[in-house]
Image (tube, coloured by chain):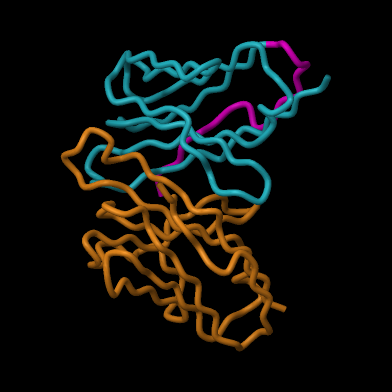
Chain colours: A cyan, B orange
Amino acid sequence: GQQLNQSPQSMFIQEGEDVSMNCTSSSIFNTWLWYKQDPGEGPVLLIALYKAGELTSNGRLTAQFGITRKDSFLNISASIPSDVGIYFCAGQLVGTASKLTFGTGTRLQVTL
Amino acid sequence: DAGVIQSPRHEVTEMGQEVTLRCKPISGHDYLFWYRQTMMRGLELLIYFNNNVPIDDSGMPEDRFSAKMPNASFSTLKIQPSEPRDSAVYFCASSLALGQISAYEQYFGPGTRLTVT
């Protein structure tokens, strides 16, 4: 099936550093979403993007809907220990109604 | 406002037993999704409903899996008979109807961790 390539797979950063991760596909998406999953919990929606080129922020998080509609980026500024978790991108593929395709996740670990 | 509610949170059962997972979506949401998450395969969509009607069950792995949504506030995912390879975390998610601005925003429950021995 359709896959979203998410990178990096994992990253170790120090507290206070900025973080960037991205999601790419060979297909066009109408909507991009970013989720965070903590251990033992369900994914929590962070940001939703609906237009190509759109840049949206949620606190220290900023996400962008790529101009080509085939990619999206998530940035976290001034990371803190509670940013630890797995970040998933998800996209609504053209022609798939309400279904979402999920990326493989980026595992973020923050050291003090 | 309550989020998506799932029960049980943990289930341990023996191979061959029937397992029933339960979900209550967010009130007012028209779509309900069942996912399975494993380390090997990530997050997989099993089936989804719109207004209590199953729309796409192409992700259901085998006939041993079945899902129902008898009303707008309740859904079940049943595995009968269960097998060790069914061990995973099962999530339920819900979203608003298409045509609304946030229609594609799916909200997940806390999941049910199923272990089949």
Question: In x, y percent, where is residue B91?
Answer: 50, 57
Q: Residue B65 location in percent, x, y?
A: 45, 76
Residue located at (63% from left, 26% from top): A8
Q: Reply yes or no: does residue A14 show up in magenta.
A: yes
The C terminus of chain A lies in quadrant: top right
For residue A17, side relative to residue A62 (left or right): right
Q: Which percent across, then down, holds residue B78?
A: 46, 77
**Residue in the picture at 47% in, 59% down:** B5
Q: Is residue A58 above or below residue B5?
A: above
Magenta-span inclusion, residue A76: no
| Nearest the eye: A13 or B64 | A13
- The image quadrant that residue A85 belongs to is top right
Seen from this angle, which residue lies furthest right? A112
The residue most toward the left is B99
Residue B1 spot, x, y in % from top left: 40, 46
- From the viewer's perspective, is B97 left or right of B87? left
Total marks in image: 0
Eyeballing the image, is B90 above or below B42? below
Q: Which residues are magenta?
A: A1-17
**Residue sitting farthest toward the bottom:** B16
Q: Residue at x 22, y 43 (%)?
A: A95
